[in-house]
Amino acid sequence: MTDSGNRSPAQRLSTFLATDPRDVGCARAMELLHVYVEYVAAGADTTRFAGVVAHLRACGPCSDEFEGLLAAVSQDPGPAGPGSSA
């Protein structure tokens, strides 16, 4: 969701009207985000996530969450992996 407190009603209306109709919204995007991140990290086909992609383009906070998750799963944990006692 975006902070609309500093924008005029005309600006808010313009943003609303420009919203991609495929945009799934924050709640649904967050439900699917971990799956979408795994697909992106694996280089898999993400066309089934068009609504999530549309939402991430429009929503800064959700896009930030995506970037953070992607960075976390993209880090190489090393040969032993996290939580191993080796």
Image: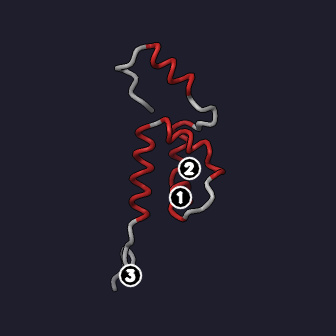
Mark 2 or mark 1, earlier in chain:
2
Q: Where does residue 51 sit, x and y in percent of width and height? A: 61, 42
Residue 6: give its label.
none
* Relative vertical location of residue 56 with respect to residue 75 in this rendering, above or below: above
The residue wearing badge 3 is 80
Question: Where's residue 84, x and y in %?
Answer: 37, 80
Tag in front: 2 or 1: 1
**Residue 54 x/y as whole percent:** 56, 40
Residue drawn 45% across and 13% down?
9
Which mark is first along the chain, 2 or 3? Answer: 2
Q: Amino acid at mark 3?
A: Ala
Residue 25's image quarter?
top right
Q: Read off the residue under disc 1.
A: 40
Taking the spot 34% from the left edge, 86% from the top edge, the residue there is: 86
Q: Nearer the viewer, residue 60 or 32?
A: 60
Q: Secondary structure at mark 1?
A: helix
CB within 8 Å, label 3 to label 2? no
Q: Classify mark 1: residues with Cα within 10 Å, few (<14), some (14-19) or many (20+).
A: some
- Camera-nearest residue between 29 and 49: 49
Question: In which quadrant is the N terminus drawn?
Answer: top left
Q: Amino acid at mark 1?
A: Val
Q: Of 1 and 57, which appears nearest the observer?
A: 57
**Quadrant of res 20:** top right
Identify the element where label 2 is drawn: helix
Q: What SS does tag 3 mark?
A: loop
- Rendered image: mark on residue 32: 2
Query: Residue 18's image quarter?
Result: top right
Separation of disc 3 and disc 2 at Cα? 29 Å
Q: Residue furthest bottom?
A: 86
